[in-house]
Image: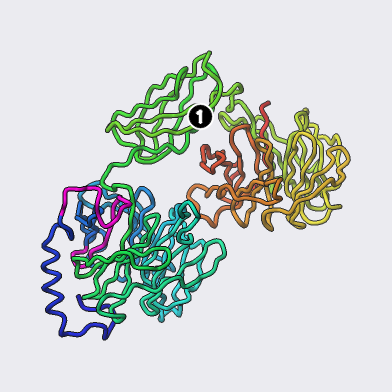
Amino acid sequence: MISFRTGRIRVGVLLMIVLSATFLASCDSLFVSDGDSDQGITAKGGYFYFIDNTTLQVLMLDRNLRVLKAWDTQVLFGDTRLQGLTFDGKYLWLSAAGSYDEIVQVDATGDTLKAVLTLDAPPEARGTIRDICWDGEYLWAVNSGSETYATPATLYRLDAATGGILFETPLPSPEPRALTYVGENGDAYGRGIASGIYYADVEHDCIYTYSTIKQLFDSVMASPEPPRGADYIFPVGLTFDGEDLWLVNSSSAGDHLYRINRKGLELERVELPYVTPGPIIWATYDIRLVNPPTINAVSPNAGSRGASINVTILGADFQDGTITVSFGAGITVSNVAFVDAGTVTATIDIAADAEFGPRTVTLTNPDGQSGLGDALFTVSEVDPLAGYLWLTDPNNDVMYKIKISDTTIVQQWDLLGVGPGGSSQGLTFDGTNVWLCDGGTNDKIIKLDTDGENLAILDSYTAPPNAEGIAREIAFDGTNMWCANSGTDYIYRLNITTGAILDSIPTPGDEIRGIVFANGNLYANDRIIDSVFVYNTGTGTWTAQFATPIPPEGDEGDRYATGMTWDGLNFWIVNSTYEFDYLFQVTTDGTVLITYEVPNRGDAQPSGILFTQE
């Protein structure tokens, strides 16, 4: 191979290199098999997935580096060399630069790679993405920068679904290449490699780490030096097997795979039989296998005894053909239909004596593989679809009562009679009466009489703290009233009768909108952070639980979560952005079960939402 770095290879060694590479490439293995399949270059087992940029192939290697499978990458990237490789627990991800500035999630269960998802390489397909890695939740990418666009070498954290940049930071070195994630590890004494993002730099001949907790870079070890000297250091691949790092060096006579321990010591060096070795990843998973089905949610996710319900099962890797579904004893399943790889529909009939409580849902594909969804459906003592949603719309000064089962508006009221400020916000229910948080010039918390065609005020008091800021939402915890204020960035606990402030806690962000109590915990959403948080009373801190939903036909910029309520099993969240005015029923992990249009979508301004059974 001709060196990637000018001046690092003498022409006089080229013949020797070519002959050596030709000989090695003709071998099926780097080792002589002794019949002991438990012995190899790594005691960790698993597989190495590796890029050979001479043949433009992804190779699957066993623990002895024998090739088990090879996939041509030209079907996805033409003649472009691959720069990055990672694995998300299910799929490989490949990245290329040049003609194809893309990061592609691929299905390798067949003889040909198939693109599952294609993302533009950050930022906006500029510069050169050198490698990628997966931390269990997010993609990370290193870009060596662009002189044309005056962008430095940068580390990016990406949304794996959209490719959106969630975080970026300049690198402390100019020429990054290999990238990997090191998770929590260590022996019985806690000794291990510090967790974080690791990358190698070909200019500084050093391996750096980025601590995602401290958000700091540090140089942790030198890149291994090939036998021919430092001029042949050129790391292009880096991976972690749970105990040690593995590094691919690609520089003609320095084409090696190194195993490196936590102290940076070289434990093993293997000469690679490839002219242009590339990035590498280690995994225990065999990507040739067809994935078993995964069940993420059931919608609706509850039903009462004696009910017959049409349900939608959401997940991944469902196969077209005869699929069987089980909800456990007392529930009969019929009319199972494959819709697509992520959607199956069915009809369930719940027996009159079915046991109450959560159920494990089992889905079995035509190939016999099954997936389990633990506690994804509940046989409820109360029909969850028999309830109502109450919704305020300050743009039209109206409050609706909406039947959940068919979205009919059963009643609506003019709000100006009780909220002359024209800025109705949140709603809550104390078990008997509906309460309204009315902002604007009124700035009151109002106990309502909703029995007639017109609303009446039963009681009211000034929103805390003494009409300062903007009172956005209220919630009842069974004893006290709580009020969230986006102007003061506090949530206040109040005496429900007098409105006196009993306590206060800071909001999780600067634009608090919805608060609600669910299963005894206080939840809140923030329209800027676009997340739902839960409050830990012991530590006095908020923890993000999930992102607020992206509306249909919209993107992340169309999220504007306002009110939030709880129906006993799920959250309901309001999104308020003109044509993206929607109501979402959302599980506690953020899975959207139901999406409804807000009345007068596009001309509304939905804010407060409330669930009641009656």
Work out which residue is located at the far front of the displayed protein and give it.
189
Q: Is residue 285 left or right of residue 56?
A: right
Q: How many marks?
A: 1
Q: Secondary structure at mark 1?
A: strand
Q: Is residue 91 left or right of residue 461?
A: left
Residue on which the image places disc 1:
377
Question: Which quadrant is the C terminus positioned in?
Answer: top right
Q: Is residue 219 left or right of residue 566?
A: left
Instruction: Return the x and y of residue 187 as percentages of the image width and height.
Output: 45, 53
- Identified at 79% across, 52% down, the residue is 440
The answer to whether any part of residue 478 appears in the image is: yes
Instruction: Return the x and y of residue 578 as percentages of the image width and height.
Output: 59, 51
Q: Quadrant of residue 518?
A: top right
- Identified at 15% across, 80% down, the residue is 14
Instruction: Return the x and y of residue 203 as percentages of the image width and height.
Output: 37, 79
Q: Quadrant of residue 430?
A: top right
- Main SS, magenta region, reads loop
Q: Nearer the viewer, residue 112 or 211?
A: 211
Please say whether residue 166 is one of the residues in the magenta stretch.
no
Question: Which quadrant is the N terminus positioned in?
Answer: bottom left
Tell me where the magenta segment starts and ends, as one range: 33-56
Image position of 513 with respect to 448: above or below = below
Instruction: Return the x and y of residue 250 as percentages of the image width and height.
Output: 27, 72
Q: Nearer the viewer, residue 286 or 79?
A: 286
Q: Quadrant of residue 246?
A: bottom left
